[in-house]
Image: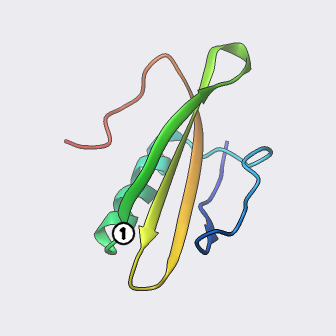
Amino acid sequence: MTGDFFTMHNSQPQKLEGEAFASFREFRDRVLQGIHRGARVISFWGYPAPDGLVILVMTLAFDKEGYLETLSIGVKGSYESLTP
C-alpha cells in the first residue's frame, strides 16, 4: 500500500475515508522527516476498521509555513515504535 501526506490549512475540512495508506516504514520515515523540518505532532489517534485493523492518523503542524500535514496507516496487532 502506498500513500502520502495530504496538506491543508487550519479549519479546512478533509475526508479521511478513501485515503491510501503507506507502509508503516514509510509512515514512520515521513513523520520523522517532518519533525526534522520543524513540524510538531498535534494529533495522533486511531480508530477500529474491518478485519481487525486499526487506522492510525497523525497530523503535523508546520507553524512557520502555516499548514498541516496528515498521514494515516492501517495496522494490525502492533507496530514499530516511532521513537528510539
Residue at x 58%, y 40% (from the top left corner): 73
Q: Quadrant of the rendered structure where residue 72 is?
A: top right
Q: Is residue 80 left or right of residue 10?
A: left
Estimate the x, y position of residue 1 in percent, counting from the top left. Answer: 67, 42
Residue at x 66%, y 49% (from the top left corner): 2
Q: Which residue is tagged 1?
A: 39
Q: Amino acid at mark 1?
A: Ala
Q: Is residue 33 left or right of residue 68?
A: left
Q: Residue furthest left?
A: 84
Q: How many marks?
A: 1
Task: Characterize the local packing of mark 1: few (<14), some (14-19) or many (20 or more) Cα atoms within 10 angstroms.
Answer: many
Q: Residue furthest front?
A: 11
Estimate the x, y position of residue 6 in percent, counting from the top left. Answer: 64, 64
In front here: 42 or 79?
Answer: 42
Q: Quadrant of the rendered structure where residue 30 is?
A: bottom left
Estimate the x, y position of residue 18 in percent, counting from the top left. Answer: 80, 45
Badge 1 marks a residue whose secondary structure is loop
Q: Above or below — where is 21 with respect to 8? A: above
Residue at x 65%, y 44% (from the top left corner): 21
The colour scheme applied to this rendered structure is rainbow
Residue at x 74%, y 19% (from the top left corner): 50
Q: Above or below — where is 53 with respect to 5? A: above
Q: Is residue 47 left or right of residue 30?
A: right
User: Quick one: quadrant of the C terminus?
Assistant: top left
Q: Residue furthest right?
A: 18
Estimate the x, y position of residue 41 in percent, counting from the top left. Answer: 38, 56
Q: Above or below — where is 24 with respect to 69? A: above
